[in-house]
Image: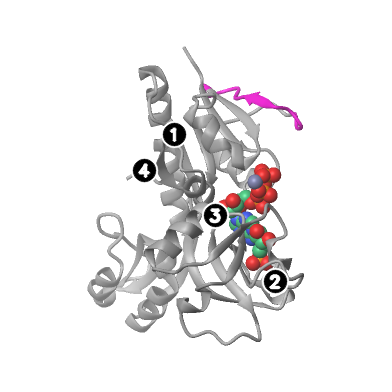
Amino acid sequence: MDKLKIAIQKKGRLSEHSLQMLEECGIKFSNGTGKLKNESKNFPLEVLFLRDDDIPYYVERKVADIGIVGENVVLEHNREITILEQLGFGGCRLSLAIPREEKYNNLNWFSGKRIATSYPNILNDFFKKNGINADIEVISGSVEIAPGIGLADGICDIVSTGSTLLSNGLHEVETVIKSQAVLVSSKELSDDKRQILDRLLFRISSTKNAAENKYILLNAPEDAVEEICNILPGMKSPTILPLAIKGWCSLHSVIREDDFWNVISRLKKAGAEGILVIPIEKMIL
Ligand code: PRT
Ligand code: ZN
């Protein structure tokens, strides 16, 4: 049977997370770094380690069947590939930034200005959509220094914490796109490869669901159970078990990580005690 080939970033911000995601899916590799490729010992998958900018093209050309790459790179390169899934890591945004001392009211600031970026296609689309006529100066790295050395009036670059902009005397004024790592695939896959991909997607969604949810256990007096059940919808409905102490029970359920602080204060108000919140390793819906 053919193996599915996945391209991931060789060295950079997405490398570790990409391998970690495959490991969380139970896919194991023999040790060995610095290699160009690596085959899994227990799943029909071969990993190719590439520069992130090359991944969309290699997937389009079917050198790799699928790949993990930033949405920003996919949109900039505009290749014939399909985005299958957002993976929940590598979060960032592509933003416009200008010198701190410049006053900014709206996008018209950019009319007639020179803007340095490594993302000319995305920026060009954005300016076009917003009726802005600006000069785009394409540079491949250290975009943030362009205004300081007189190469441009502003920049369009990837931002995550914002500290790079700050230390270069720039301030962020518009978000052009939001981005995160995505799983992409070539437009056509053989039936065999499609089957392997479906198995991989199933594992990815089980680990993603698990990461987004928590298992919650708590004790409560019986007369508080109804109210607590309304706060905790869970996967179907909470599990309720009697405690050794009369009139008390234990409730088990699942809540979204995003919600749980909010829910916990409501639970305590309703009479819940001994609340435990536990990570879930896999969650199959
Ligand atoms: O060598 P290769 O070409 O493979 O790697 P690369 O250097 O082109 O990419 P890399 O590893 O820097 O980033 C890979 C992907 O990570 C990007 O395509 C984004 O999808 C995502 N990502 C997430 C980021 C950032 N966060 C990020 N902060 N990519 C780059 N940055 C840079 C940004 O360019 C700027 O220089 O970090 C700086 C800003 O960071 P803050 O925290 O100071 O705002
Ligand atoms: Zn790159």
Mark 1 Cα shell of 10 Å, populated few (<14), some (14-19), many (≥20): many
Ligand 1's quadrant: bottom right
Apparent side of residue 158 relative to residue 229 in the rendered image (left or right): right
Mark 2 Cα shell of 10 Å, populated few (<14), some (14-19), many (≥20): many
Task: Name the residue beneath numbered marker 1.
Answer: 185
Residue 29: x and y in percent read 64, 28
Q: Are marks 3 and 4 in contact (CB under 8 Å)?
A: no
Mark 3 vs 1, N-terminal side: 3
Amino acid type shown at disc 4: Ile
Q: Image quadrant of residue 20?
A: top right
Q: Are marks 1 and 4 in contact (CB under 8 Å)?
A: no
Q: Regarding mark 2 in the picture, which secondary structure is present there?
A: loop
Residue 147, labelled with which disc? 2
Residue 120, labelled with which disc? 3
Mark 2 vs 4, N-terminal side: 2
Residue 79: x and y in percent read 46, 38
